[in-house]
Image: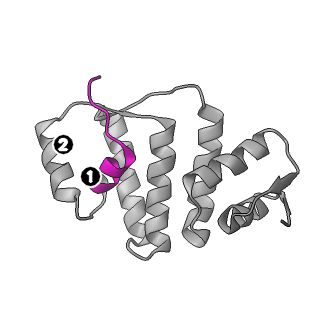
Amino acid sequence: MRHYADTSFLFSYYGSDANSPRADAWRQSHPVPLPLTPLHRLELRNALQLAVFRKSLAAHEVGEIWRTVESDVRAGLLAERDFGLDRLFHDAETLAANHTSQIGTRSLDILHVTAALLLGIEEFATFDQRQQALATRAWLRVVAL
């Protein structure tokens, strides 16, 4: 595999923004499988849910986009690749799907909360309000700082 597309490219390719025409043109001239890592999945799902939160995409549009992504995985246009963080990223993806459109959580916030959950942590300390909201929704006790 030679080509790597970051999440901003995938968002432009599967969604619709100012960079979409360039992403579409590049993809048509490079119809090779692109890697899809757990990080891509998390960042793309989160970016799409943030678009719902910001009202630039509707929830049904996100569903359609995600079905296209999954279809491209089955067709071999996206090749799933793993770099050893399956559990962390899988659980973080679930948190993103369930909470980002309501509270606007960022990817790194999700990774921190997920890591705390996987480690069996009971208290979560942060100054970040979005991270506090996610930790609370994930049944972690948030330390007031």
The mark tally for this picture is 2
Residue 10 highlighted magenta (yes or no)? yes
**Percent x, y for residue 25?**
12, 48
Outermost residue to the bottom: 55
Residue 72 picture quarter: top left
Query: Is residue 3 at all visible to an observer of this figure?
Result: yes
Q: In this view, does 142 lie above or below 85?
A: below
Vertical placement of residue 141 versus 37, above or below = below
Q: Which quadrant of the figure contains the C terminus?
A: bottom right
Crowding at dot 1, Cα within 10 Å, few <14 / some 14-19 / many 20+, comes out as: many
For label 2, the residue is 27
How dense is the environment of label 2, judged by Cα within 10 Å: few (below 14), some, or many (20 and up)? some
Q: Which residue was labeled with disc 1?
A: 13
Residue at the location (49% across, 63% down)?
49
Query: Does residue 105 appear to the left or right of 3 in the view shown?
Result: right
Q: How far apart are marks 2 and 1 (CA)?
A: 8 Å
Label pair 2/1, CB-CB below 8 angstroms: yes
Which region shows up in magenta?
A: 1-13
Taking the spot 64% from the left edge, 46% from the top edge, the residue there is: 111
According to the image, what is the colour scheme of the structure? one colour
Q: Under tag 1, what secondary structure? A: helix
The mark nearer the N terminus, 2 or 1, is 1
Q: Which amino acid does label 1 sit on?
A: Tyr
Residue occupying the far top of the picture: 1
Residue 133 spot, x, y in % from top left: 72, 67
- Specify whether residue 29 is painted magenta: no
